[in-house]
Image: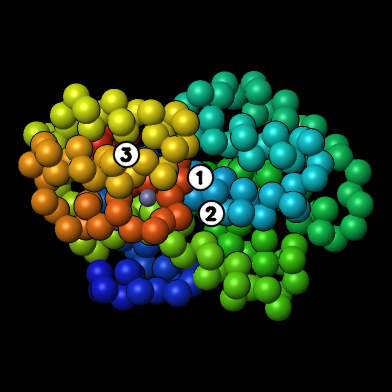
Amino acid sequence: MTDREWDDCPSSDHMFMPLHKWMLGAPSRHQTLDRKLRLFAVACCRQRQELFTDPHCARAVETAERVADGQSNSAEAKELYNAIMNLPCDGAQAHVIHNVTLKLIGASGLQAAMGVIMDLAVATGWDDFHSITAVQAPLLRCVVGNPFRPVAFDPRWRSTTAISLGEAIYVDRAFERLPILADALQDAGCEHPDVLGHCRGGGPHVRGCWVIDLLLGKAQ
Ligand SMILES: [Zn+2]
């Protein structure tokens, strides 16, 4: 896959094999991508939050986000995992959603991400597969960026203003402020079209957004 094909790819499932191949190209990519792919999985579940009606399953989505950022201890995730395992299975859709949430908190980020692509399609009927993977594609680009056109983030762009804006955006999930961050990065000397374009583009943006991660040093 070329960088342009990645930019234009309409479906998350078509992006996954090339992404996995790219991951295998360097061991250091695994840890970074594990966090990002778990956050991608969380974002995909939030897009279909109407499916996560059971309180344990809804909690698993929140917990998985904290697991990704190292803010959840393993006992918390294990307790929740066991609780979901013991939930009564009320129909095929509930069964699939339970499985998704178990992967979110109990499997690797890669497995969680692959799980949401397939399982959310199963949970909502295969007829919906294309619309589900279509809305997931920009989420995957938001968290991973473009692996076939990596950006070298210049440390000089990490001005005090840009860092404090980035931290607030991450904590508050205030991604509507990304155009303001673009201005701050530009004031710090950034003219990179991918960085500025991503901040000023229409999104969607979620936790794990590659520009925020590079700014805050979360992607190393
Ligand atoms: Zn983004």
User: Element type at marker 3?
Assistant: helix
Disc marking residue 213: 3
Q: In the rendered structure, which disc, 2 or 1, sits on the residue that comes first in sequence?
A: 1
User: Element type at marker 1?
Assistant: helix
- The one of 189 and 66 positioned closer to us in this rendering: 189
Q: Residue at x 61, y 32 (%)?
A: 63
Q: What residue type is labelled 2?
A: Ala
Q: Which amino acid does label 1 sit on?
A: Arg
Q: Distance between the residues labelled 2 and 1?
A: 6 Å
- The one of 60 and 25 positioned closer to us in this rendering: 60
User: Element type at marker 2?
Assistant: helix
Q: Say whether mark 1 is within 8 Å of ligand 1.
A: no
Q: Position of residue 207 (x, y in %)?
A: 45, 41
Please identify, in this view, whether the residue under mark 1 or under mark 3 is nearer the observer.
Answer: 3
Label 3 crowd (10 A; few <14 / some 14-19 / many >=20): some
Q: Residue at x 44, y 62 (%)?
A: 138
Q: How far apart are marks 1 and 3 (CA)?
A: 14 Å
- The one of 25 and 211 positioned closer to us in this rendering: 211
Dividing the image into 4 quarters, which one contains the N terminus? Answer: bottom left
Q: Which residue is drawn at 64% across and 40% down?
A: 61
Q: Is residue 33 visible?
A: no
Q: Mark 1 points at which residue?
A: 38
Q: Mark 2 points at which residue?
A: 113
Looking at the image, residue 173 lies above or below residue 204: above
